[in-house]
Structures are given as structure tokens and as C-alpha cells.
Image (tube, rainbow, N blue to C red):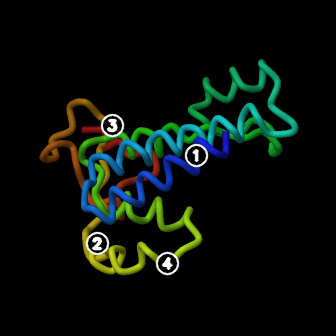
Amino acid sequence: MQTKISYLLAKGVGAILEKKVDNARQSAMLASFLEQYRAAFVCKNPPSRESHLLNLLNGGTRIHKDDPAWNWGKISELSNDTCDEHTIVSFFRKRVPCKCLDRRYKEVKSIVKMGRCSNPSCPLPDGQVECSKLLYCSKCFT
């Protein structure tokens, strides 16, 4: 499992350095999914089936402090076409030990991170707003 994650990280970093953001986005989404899958099911103490089902019903929050939680929001954010370069570069930069993305990160650091409102009837343009202005639940309730 770790080999697959490492491959996706290497592929994504290469795509970022070549400025192929869509390819990097796909690698980031798959790597994030596999990291969370490994934490939930391949760890030494995987959660019980009942605990996992409760976890899903509660939107990915932890039921017990030792249970890994799925962060579907992160996977969704990375798979979204509106995910900005800042988020993609930050994702890979946090996961690779080398400094090859530092220069690229400085280039994209000034990009404002955008989030998508999950309300289908959101009046915002494309349902997007700055992440710093989103509430935790990311719903505008309009």
C-alpha cells in the first residue's frame, strides 16, 4: 500500500514541476484516499464493522478516539476541478521530504484558497468563496 502511495506522490510532484495541475490533482486525490484507507483498514487495530458504519453515518467523525476517521471533505476537495494550485502544491509539499516544491510553493502561495459551498442552491458565483470565510460546515443556508 505504501508503495502505491509513494508512486502517486512521486507522479504528482513530477506533474507539479511540469505545471500539469490536472494530473497532479488526480494523483493527490488517489493518494489521499489510499492514505485514509490504510489508516482505517490496514492499521494494526482496524475499527470494528459497527464502528466503521457509525463513522460513515456521522460524516467521517471519530466514534472512539482510537478509530481512524475518513475525511471525505479532503478527498472531495482534491478531486474537485475548482481545487486551486495552492492546495495541490501544499498537499504534496507536506508529504515529500525533499525541497523540490519550495520554489513552486512560493509561486502559488499568493493564490487565495477557495472552497465550495455544499448548498446546491447557493447564490455565490459557482458556489465558491474564500476558505477563510467558510463556516466549518461550509453551508451558507440561503
Residue 97 shows which numbered tag? none
Instruction: From the top left corner, tell me how far across and down residue 96 is, in percent.
Output: 55, 65
Label 2 vs 4, first from the N-terminus: 4
The residue carrying mark 3 is 118
Point 42% across, 45% down: residue: 27
Choose mark 2 or mark 3, whichever is in front. 2
Point 26% across, 67% down: residue: 112
Q: As shown in the figure, which amino acid type bears the numbered disc 4?
A: Lys
- For label 2, the crowd category at 10 Å Cα-Cα, with few meaning under 14, some 14 to 19 and many 20 or more, is some
Label 4 vs 3, first from the N-terminus: 4
Image: 18 above or below 38? below
Instruction: From the top left corner, tell me how far across and down residue 5 is, in percent.
Output: 58, 46
Choose mark 4 or mark 3, whichever is in front. 4
The residue carrying mark 1 is 5
Q: As shown in the figure, which amino acid type bears the numbered disc 1?
A: Ile
- For label 4, the crowd category at 10 Å Cα-Cα, with few meaning under 14, some 14 to 19 and many 20 or more, is few
Instruction: From the top left corner, tell me how far across and down residue 75 is, in percent.
Output: 46, 41
Q: Is residue 125 left or right of residue 138?
A: left
Image: 114 above or below 32? below
The quadrant where residue 18 appears: bottom left
Q: Secondary structure at mark 3?
A: loop
Cα distance between the residues tagged 4 and 3: 35 Å
The quadrant where residue 63 appears: top right
Q: Secondary structure at mark 2?
A: helix
Label 1 vs 3, first from the N-terminus: 1
Label 2 vs 1, first from the N-terminus: 1
Cα distance between the residues tagged 1 and 3: 29 Å
The residue carrying mark 2 is 108
Tell me if label 1 and label 3 are in contact, CB under 8 Å: no
